[in-house]
Amino acid sequence: MTLQDPLAIIREGAAIPAHPLALDAARRLAQRRQRALTRYYIDAGAGGLAVGVHTTQFAIREAGLYEPVLSLAAETAADWTDRPLAMIAGVAGRTGQAVAEARLARSLGYHAVLFSLAAFKGASEDELIDACAA
């Protein structure tokens, strides 16, 4: 898939839902249920998936789940369909963390990121632009 495919999907206005996080009763990643959610959104006709973007999912970084959650969604989507999807990963934190997360997302096959600027509270516009440009 070329980069133009996900860009075309986004430009067409496709629905790209924020992927929920499936946890078991002990608050661990429920991989079977997480895969089922990915397949559900694909089967429902979503144009892609936005993983790790919801504010309730920012804690996945602290729990060491960021890479496993992104990886599981990307692998499941690739195994489930040949249809082009726009895969979006959430990135957060100051510039160094956000860049590292963006690189990881890219290595897992994600096409774009949604950058939470919450860590930049009180930053100037120039600081925000510099962080986004990094």
Image (cartoon, rainbow, N blue to C red):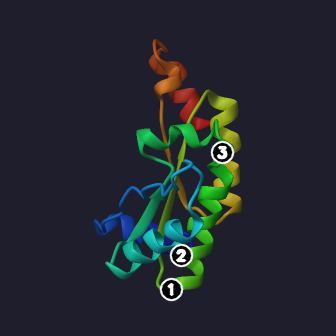
Toward which corner of the image does residue 18 lie, by quadrant?
A: bottom left
Q: Position of residue 38 (x, y in %)?
A: 47, 71
Name the residue: 67% across, 34% down.
97
Q: Earlier in the sequence, mark 1 or mark 3?
A: 1
Q: Position of residue 130 (x, y in %)?
A: 58, 28
Name the residue: 70% across, 31% down.
96
Q: Secondary structure at mark 3?
A: helix
Mark 2: amino acid: Ala
Name the residue: 71% across, 60% down.
107
Q: Secondary structure at mark 1?
A: loop
| On screen, residue 88 above or below 15 | above
| On screen, residue 54 above or below 40 | above
Residue 77 has which mark? 2
| On screen, residue 81 above or below 28 | below
Residue 81 has which mark? 1
Q: Is residue 20 visible?
A: yes
Q: Is residue 110 left or right of residue 96?
A: left
Indicate which label's residue lies in the foreground, 3 or 2. 2
Q: Position of residue 23 (x, y in %)?
A: 51, 54
Residue 120 has which mark? none
Mark 1: amino acid: Thr
Nearer-the-camera pick, 43 or 126: 43
Q: In the displayed image of the protein, which residue is found farthest to the front?
A: 25
Neighbourhood count class around disc 2 (C-alpha, 10 Å): few under 14, some 14–19, many 20 upward: many
Toward which corner of the image does residue 106 lie, by quadrant?
A: bottom right
Q: Earlier in the sequence, mark 3 or mark 2?
A: 2
Nearer-the-camera pick, 2 or 117: 117
Question: CA gap, disc 1 to disc 2?
Answer: 6 Å
Neighbourhood count class around disc 1 (C-alpha, 10 Å): few under 14, some 14–19, many 20 upward: few
Q: Which residue is mark 3?
A: 101
Q: Secondary structure at mark 2?
A: helix
